[in-house]
Image: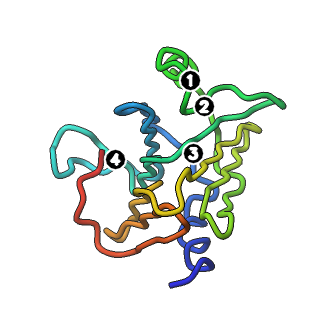
Amino acid sequence: MNELSVAEIISGLRGRCPWGVRLGHGSFLTMEFGERREGDLHGATHHGEWHLWFYMCNWRIEAAGKVLVGSDDDREKMLKTLDGFEFGGVKDIRVALPSLDLAIQFDSGTEIFTFSSSESGPDQWWLFTPDGNCLTVHGGGRFRYGSSSEPRA
């Protein structure tokens, strides 16, 4: 699989509106897309057909020419900004080379950017797909796409 394949996989999010946007441990950020799926490995959290998890990467949300919030901001600010925020549908989604950082533009004009912070660091972001696979992007632009054996956060 090459970087073009990564772009093809993430293109499945185009036109979909995120729901269930949650701030997890630290600055972990998750978003659900598509139809709600009942139950998961833990039975507590419902996920969408698509589950995007900003795991160990920096991220930033921008709108109207300004930065609204970022992963290094105070947790209360992150929670307040995300509470009830309306993103709209995914208008465009791009993956940068060679880092595989994401840039997601929504119909509302809001954009989310991810930034890997290490050449060889841990997983940066995960995208669980409707077919039961997971695209895992690591530091330095490495990635894996295959069967999901990890629980969804």
Q: Quadrant of residue 109?
A: top right
Q: Quadrant of the C terminus?
A: top left
The residue that label 2 is drawn on is: 70
Q: Amino acid at mark 2?
A: Gly
Residue 75 sits above or below residue 147 on the image: above
Q: In the structure shown, which secondary structural element does the residue marked by tag 1 occupy?
A: loop
Q: In the structure shown, which secondary structural element does the residue marked by tag 2 occupy?
A: strand
Residues packed near mark 3 inside 10 Å, few (<14), some (14 to 19) or many (20 plus): some
Q: Amino acid at mark 4?
A: His
Q: In the structure shown, which secondary structural element does the residue marked by tag 4 occupy?
A: strand
Residues packed near mark 1 inside 10 Å, few (<14), some (14 to 19) or many (20 plus): few
Please name which of the two marks, 1 or 4, marks the residue nearer to the observer: 1
Residue 105 sits above or below residue 130 on the image: above
The residue that label 1 is drawn on is: 73
Q: Amino acid at mark 3?
A: Cys
The residue that label 4 is drawn on is: 47
Gap between marks 1 and 4 measured at Cα: 26 Å
Q: Amino acid at mark 1?
A: Asp
The residue that label 3 is drawn on is: 17
Image x and y of residue 129, in percent: 41, 64
Rendered residue at 67%/53% (across/down): 103
Viewer-closest of 73 and 112: 73
Tag 2–tag 1 contact (CB < 8 Å): yes
Tag 3–tag 1 contact (CB < 8 Å): no
The earlier-in-sequence mark between 3 and 1 is 3
The earlier-in-sequence mark between 1 and 4 is 4
Gap between marks 3 and 2 measured at Cα: 20 Å
